[in-house]
Amino acid sequence: MKKLLVFALVLFSIGTQLNAQDTEGASIAELKQQLEFLKGKLTPLQEQMQPIQDQADAIQKKLDGMAADGWTYGGDGLLAIDLTVFSDWAAAAGTKRLFGLTGNVNLFANYKKDKFLLENKGAFKLGYTRTVTEAQEFDFIKGIDEIMLSSNANYLITDKLSINGAASFQSQFAPGYNFAETDTFQVSKFAAPAYINAGVGIKYIPNQMVSVTYHPLNYKMTYVNWEQTSAPGDSITTYNLTETNPDLQQVFFGVDAGAGKKSFHTVGSYLNVSFRKDLMKRVSFASTLDVYLSYLTRNLDSDNFFNDRVTANWNNVIGLQINKFLSATLDFTLRREYAENDKWQMRYFQGIGLSAKF
């Protein structure tokens, strides 16, 4: 009896093992079938992803090349439209609509190797505004016009402090006009005026938001490309940006045109404080303060130290990136330069338009 029981148990064990092997074999077949199914699904996806992968590889290759030679390049641009429409709006004083178009391009090319850092920047702005009233339609008037080129060479003493040497050029693209009651006079154009600065000092970057540059020795030249239409010393005028502009003064932008000069030179100190912070997602704020103090009298207003010696420019920009191609900008600037105007100058711009980074 015992032998029969043992024999039955052996047969049961063998049958169980054979059944398990059949089940295992069926499971492997099912898995292989599922694998082939998934591979069939992945093939078209991989074909679609390949162009994207190729672009990513090309960009990475470009970045690797830049890192190898030390250069990085880039920039951004904005084409903004500003439109205001009035209908019997009392405060508009008869104005029906205001229309503005502004272009803004910023470029950079930087080089870094060991402790040497070279920063090159170009900022270009040009905008026009047209006013339509109940009485007439005015031509487009230049509202914003800037050319700013700068180059900063830094030798790093520490991660935050460097010896700095810098040069900059500032002017405008298009002619500017004084719209008088009886006539229209041209009062500015390219290189009239133009400002050239060059100085040496230190640059301090305590964190990613703030940078401070100070030049105890800074050269500044004001250049005015004017046309002489009468002999120097003429009692009417010797300074004309056009042939018919009798109301311009003998000294313009600090340059003594009455003596036949086109430039004015001075030496002083220069301070730049820059701040940039992301206020929230897609919203950024940037502020830049430039102050120049002349060590030499400019003979503009000898009774007022600030007027005669100091130039100040404070620019503030709030940017909103709505999506990949659309952004909005608020740009506010205060400026004090007695050679240009005996009052504080203020400029405010707001616009929404197409944007791009490259």
Image (cartoon, grey):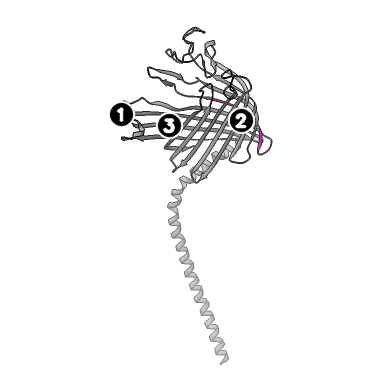
The residues tagged by marks 1 and 2 sit, at their Cα atoms, a distance apart of: 48 Å
Quarter of the figure with residue 85: top left
Among numbered discs 2 and 3, the one appearing first in the sequence? 3
Q: Is residue 6 above or below residue 312?
A: below
Magenta segment? 158-169
Mark 2 surroundings within 10 Å by alpha-carbon count, few (fewer than 14), some (14 through 19), many (20 or more) = some
CA distance separating discs 2 and 3? 29 Å
- Please, what is the three-letter code of the amino acid marked with disc 3? Thr
x and y percentages locating residue 29 in the rendered image = 47, 66
Residue at label 1? Answer: 134
Quarter placement of the N terminus = bottom right
Q: Are marks 1 and 2 in contact (CB under 8 Å)?
A: no
Left/right of residue 251 with respect to residue 350 in the rendered view: right
Residue at 52%, 30% (x, y): give it. Answer: 122
Residue annotated with mark 3: 102
The tag earlier along the polypeptide, 1 or 2, is 1
Query: Mark 2 near mark 3, Cβ–Cβ under 8 Å?
Result: no
For the residue pair 306 and 198, the one nearer the viewer reads as: 306
